[in-house]
Image: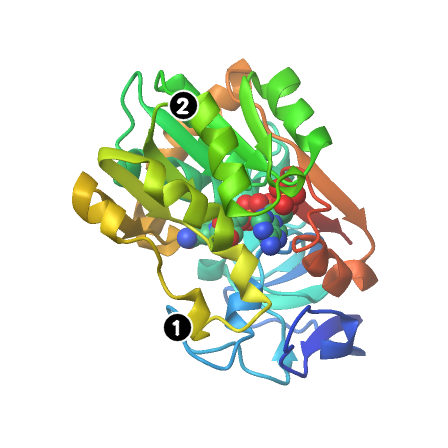
Amino acid sequence: MKNTQWIYRKRPLAQVGAEHYELISQEIADDLAKNEVLIEAKYISVDPYMRIQQAESSSWEAPHPLDCVQGSGVVASVLKSKSDAFNEGDWVYAYSGWQTHAIMHAAELTKLNPQQAPVTTALGVLGMPGRTAWFGLTEAGKPKAGDTVVVSAAAGAVGSLVVQFAKLHGAKVIGITGSDNKNRWLSEELGIAHTLNYKRFNGAKDFALALKELTDGVDIYFDNVGGWITDAIIPQINLRGRIIICGQISQYNGGLDRVELSPRFLHHLLYKRATVQGILARDYIHRHDEMLRVVAPMIKSGLLKYTETMVQGFEQLPHALNMLFTGDNVGKMIVAV
Ligand SMILES: NC(=O)c1ccc[n+]([C@@H]2O[C@H](COP(=O)([O-])OP(=O)(O)OC[C@H]3O[C@@H](n4cnc5c(N)ncnc54)[C@H](OP(=O)(O)O)[C@@H]3O)[C@@H](O)[C@H]2O)c1
């Protein structure tokens, strides 16, 4: 049996693309040891954190090593199993990376129930992005009814959930995206009344004025992007406001530790006794089931909406990763093998 893999070969200095990878095919043996399972990838995730790990410096962990399969979350079906816990045809989640097949230990697999939710949700709303949105907002943001919550990258995998969770907590929500179509989707499909398209403004000052027209101040800023959008929001933070640093995607392609990217306008935090807290999905892995117990019923009942941008073709993986940086996704970006 052939296993096709995207091997990560070269660290990108700016945008990531196929030139930083090599596509190879090699035989995969299917003689399994006890508790091993052979899986075939059906849906593969691309996520912004991959670009952080491609930098040379460490983040929450060492940089992604060169010359091995690009790591990622995968939804797969079981082809062959030497584990009592898995049968041929089962759907599973695995962190098996950008490859069509893998032999995994049963302990590395999570069984999915397609009757409960579409299996692709394990990469999005019921997976890592869902966990990020739920715990990031509720634990770090502590939203209350009447709060003004501003969310950047508001139509993305994490942001589109955060805006809805905030609304369900009774907050006034302002979603920021880089597209009128995304903002239309936020208002028409998710019921987010206030949106701003940052690309329509001439920098932070101009954008800050438009934000000021929508609100008297910001209680929670759920920051997915950093850069000048965040610069424009910090001075509008309210007394005891909370800034949640979930991501800084505007900076991932440009070299994360450049001096000019250092925090700015921090004196406003002093005046407002505001807090800034970084959050990481992995810190809540042990509470994933808790998130599922809350969020899965919301999906079933239609209270929470989600969408996915599905790119067709294993060979499109590096391109799909780059599409996160050109804003070509709404909701969770997934590659269908
Ligand atoms: N802390 C954690 O554990 C954790 C977990 C998951 C994700 N994250 C972070 O959360 C953020 C969103 O992740 P996601 O998976 O949900 O991705 P996503 O929002 O689905 O996709 C990324 C979006 O970012 C926006 N974007 C790209 N470049 C930008 C720029 N220069 N300025 C402003 N916006 C830009 C684009 O939307 P527009 O069209 O609106 O520009 C794009 O669609 C990322 O920063 C990611 O690193 C953190």
The answer to whether residue 158 shows anywhere in this view is: no
Q: Which mark is residue 61?
A: 1
Q: Secondary structure at mark 1?
A: loop
Residue 32 horizontal side relative to residue 109, left or right: right
Specify the amino acid type for callout 1.
Answer: Glu
| The N terminus lies in quadrant | bottom right
Residue positioned 39% across, 29% down in the render: 149
Specify the amino acid type for callout 2.
Answer: Thr
| The C terminus lies in quadrant | bottom right
| Residue 246 vertical placement versus 135 (above, below) | below
The answer to whether residue 118 shows anywhere in this view is: yes
| Residue marked by disc 2 | 215
For disc 2, the neighbor class at 10 Å (few under 14, some 14 to 19, many from 20) is some
Q: Nearer the viewer, mark 2 or mark 1?
A: 2
Residue 255 horizontal side relative to residue 99, left or right: left
Marks 2 and 1, Cα distance to the nearest angstrom? Answer: 38 Å
For the residue pair 57 and 81, the one nearer the viewer reads as: 57
Q: Position of residue 90 (x, y in %)?
A: 63, 45
| Residue 212 vertical placement versus 99 (above, below) | above
For disc 1, the neighbor class at 10 Å (few under 14, some 14 to 19, many from 20) is few
